[in-house]
Image (spheres, rainbow, N blue to C red):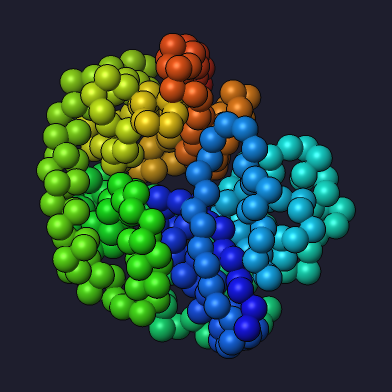
C-alpha cells in the first residue's frame, strides 16, 4: 500500500483540480491500493522544495515547478517558468523522467494532465469532463466577458474564489477530494463553502471599489497599489472589468508572508499582446505564463516591490503604444 505524495499549486483551482485528478488516475490505472497525501506549494523566495518535500513512497508534482531530485517520479506542469534554474531545465531536457511531462502551451495543467494520462495510459476521464472544462476556462482566462469573471455567477467561479482565499489545511484536503466525487454545484452549496464564501464575496464587491480608487490608467496600462488596503487576495479580472480597453495590468499587494507584484495582459485583447510577461517577471526573480505572471518579495521589501511595479508598468506602456 504505497503512500503517494502529491505536491500541487496551492490556493489555485487548477492546482487543486490537477491534484484531485491525478489521485483518481493513479488509483484507477497504476495502483488501486495506494493512499494519498497532499501538500500545497506557493511561489516565493528561497528554496522551493525543502528536505522533506519528497518523502512519499511515490512523489508527484502537479501544476508547479520542476525538481531534479531523483525522488520525484511524476511531474505535470504548463508554466513557462517551470524550471527554477537553467541547470534544472538542462537536466530535464537531458534526462526527462519516464513520467515527467511539460507543455508550456497548455492553458491549464488539469486538462494537460487528463489528456496525457488518457493518451499514454488509456485513462477515461469523461466523468470529470465538466471539472476539466472549468479548470481550463479559469486557468486559461477563457471567460465569456470581464463581467462573467467578476460577477461570479457560476459555481465554478465561486469555488475559484473560495480556494484562492481558503487557508484551512483540512478544508483544502476536503475540497481536493470533493472535486472528483461531487459536482461543482454540489460543492459550491456545501456549508463549509457558503459560510466562508459570504464574507469573501462581500469583500470581493468592496475590492472593486478599492481597486477603482487605487488604480490609474495610462497608455493602455492599468496600475494599482492595494498594499495598504488588506487586499492580499483579490479577483485578478477586476481591472479588466473596470478598464475593458486596457492591454496590461500591474498591481502591488501585501500579504502576511510576501509583497507581491502581479502582472497580466487583457484576456479579451490577447491578439494585441506583444510582451511575454513570464520573461518580464523572471528578470525580477518571478515567473508565470506569457500572459500572466508575478514576483514575490519579502514583506519588508515593499518599497522595492513598488519600484519593480513602476519599472514594469512603464515598460508595458511603451510596448502597448506600439500594439494595434
Image position of 275 (left or right of 174):
right
Residue drawn at (14%, 46%), measured in percent from left and top? 199
Location of the C terminus by quadrant is top left
Q: State whether residue 107 appears in this view.
A: no
Q: Position of residue 207 (x, y in %)?
A: 19, 33
139 vs 236: above or below: below
Foreground residue among 37 and 179: 37
Residue drawn at (41%, 83%), measured in percent from left and top? 127
Q: State whether residue 48 appears in this view.
A: yes
Q: Position of residue 219 (x, y in %)?
A: 37, 17
Foreground residue among 291 and 179: 179
Location of the N terminus by quadrant is bottom right
Q: Residue furthest right?
A: 94
Q: Position of residue 70 (x, y in %)?
A: 79, 58
Residue drawn at (73%, 37%), measured in percent from left and top? 85
Q: Position of residue 154 (x, y in %)?
A: 22, 61
Image position of 295 (left or right of 257):
right
Residue drawn at (27%, 19%), measured in percent from left and top? 228
Foreground residue among 277 and 272: 277
271 vs 319: above or below: below
Amino acid at each position: 500500500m504505497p503512500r503517494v505524495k502529491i505536491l500541487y499549486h496551492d490556493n489555485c483551482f487548477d492546482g487543486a483540480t490537477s491534484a484531485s485528478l491525478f489521485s483518481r488516475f493513479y488509483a484507477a490505472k497504476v495502483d488501486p491500493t495506494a493512499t494519498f497525501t497532499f501538500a500545497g506549494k506557493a511561489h516565493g523566495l528561497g528554496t522551493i522544495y525543502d528536505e522533506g518535500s519528497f518523502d512519499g513512497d511515490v512523489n508527484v508534482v502537479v501544476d508547479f515547478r520542476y525538481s531534479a531530485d531523483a525522488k520525484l517520479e511524476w511531474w505535470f506542469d504548463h508554466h513557462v517558468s517551470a524550471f527554477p534554474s537553467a541547470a534544472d531545465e538542462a537536466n530535464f531536457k537531458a534526462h526527462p523522467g519516464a513520467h515527467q511531462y511539460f507543455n508550456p502551451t497548455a492553458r491549464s495543467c488539469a486538462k494537460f494532465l487528463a489528456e496525457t494520462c488518457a493518451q499514454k495510459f488509456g485513462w477515461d476521464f469523461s466523468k470529470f469532463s465538466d471539472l476539466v472544462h472549468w479548470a481550463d476556462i479559469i486557468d486559461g482566462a477563457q471567460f465569456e466577458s470581464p463581467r462573467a469573471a467578476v460577477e461570479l455567477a457560476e459555481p465554478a467561479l465561486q469555488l475559484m474564489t473560495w480556494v484562492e482565499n481558503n487557508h484551512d489545511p483540512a478544508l483544502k484536503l476536503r475540497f481536493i477530494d470533493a472535486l472528483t466525487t461531487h459536482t461543482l454545484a454540489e460543492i459550491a452549496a456545501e456549508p463549509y463553502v457558503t459560510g466562508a464564501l459570504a464574507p469573501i464575496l462581500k469583500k470581493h464587491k468592496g475590492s472593486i471599489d478599492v481597486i477603482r480608487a487605487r488604480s490609474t490608467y495610462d497608455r493602455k496600462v492599468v496600475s494599482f497599489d492595494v498594499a495598504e488596503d488588506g487586499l492580499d487576495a483579490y479577483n485578478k479580472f477586476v481591472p479588466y472589468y473596470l478598464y475593458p480597453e486596457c492591454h496590461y495590468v500591474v498591481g502591488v499587494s501585501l500579504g502576511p508572508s510576501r509583497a507581491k507584484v502581479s502582472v497580466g495582459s487583457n484576456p479579451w485583447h490577447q491578439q494585441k499582446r506583444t510582451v511575454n510577461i513570464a520573461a518580464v517577471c523572471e528578470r525580477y526573480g518571478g515567473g508565470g505564463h506569457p500572459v500572466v505572471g508575478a514576483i514575490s518579495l519579502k514583506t519588508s521589501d515593499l518599497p522595492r516591490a513598488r519600484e519593480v511595479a513602476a519599472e514594469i508598468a512603464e515598460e508595458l506602456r511603451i510596448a502597448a503604444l506600439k500594439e494595434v
